[in-house]
Amino acid sequence: MTGEGRGSRRTGRSERPAEERAEALKERVYATFTGLAIVLVQHANVEHVSPARATVTLLVGIVAITAAGFVAEVVAHLAVHSAFPGRAEAGRMVRVSASAIGSVAVPLLLLALAWAGVFELDRALRAASIVYLATLGLIGYVAVRRTRVAWWKQLVALGALVALGGVVVLLQQLAHGH
């Protein structure tokens, strides 16, 4: 493969429509919140969870939210267009939904290292939680920084996003009885 071929593929990714990029980011945020909820619940019950189970549970949870995102895309398309998506649209749906998988890479690696005995599960779950929180914070920060409003409005917006994220985490914890 020539360097030109690789460059054109990269260019193709960055030239995806803004709406598709926004949808993919939204899927990653959903998956990040889901992953965070999973690791927080497991951390609260760490004495009853093995590293193997924690790793598999996180992987299955993220694959499930990814599949749910794809099914939601197909159902919405059917409802709006009264037809199944064509090949190009189905490909777009797969790309958007599959982007959620990326959210699990580092947390899954941390849990796999605990499974391999490199460090304790408690520490791996705590580190995975921090990775998820940092990811959400970074996404919010980048989103707010892209706006063209005064710095203090960006700060207020970021504070609001952090507060809303905190509410989501609290609700997820309440749903699991913690």
Image: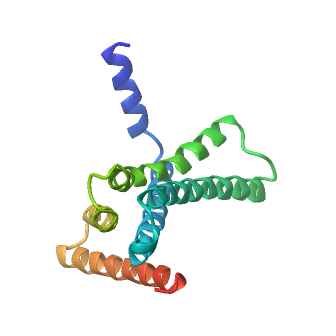
Left or right of 139: which side holds 81?
right
Quadrant position of the N terminus in the picture: top left
List x then y, in percent, for residue 149.
Answer: 25, 71
Out of 127 and 74, give the one closest to the viewer: 127
How many numbered discs sit on the rendered protein? 0
* Residue ID at (68%, 35%): 87
* Residue ID at (66%, 41%): 90
List x then y, in percent, for residue 119.
Answer: 26, 57
* Residue ID at (32%, 51%): 113
Q: Is residue 111 above or below residue 157?
A: above
Of all residues, the one furthest to the left in this rendering is 151
Out of 42 and 34, give the one closest to the viewer: 42
Q: How is the image coloured?
A: rainbow
Left or right of 20: which side holds 44?
left
List x then y, in percent, for residue 103.
Answer: 41, 54
* Residue ID at (41%, 59%): 51
Of all residues, the one furthest to the top in this rendering is 2
List x then y, in percent, for residue 76.
Answer: 70, 58
Left or right of 9: which side holds 158?
left
Find residue 127 and report its image quarter.
bottom left
Q: Is residue 122 above or below residue 153?
A: above
Out of 47 and 27, give the one closest to the viewer: 47
Res 134 visible: no
Res 154 visible: yes
Left or right of 147: which side holds 78?
right
Q: Is residue 7 above or below residue 155?
A: above
Out of 17 and 107, give the one closest to the viewer: 107
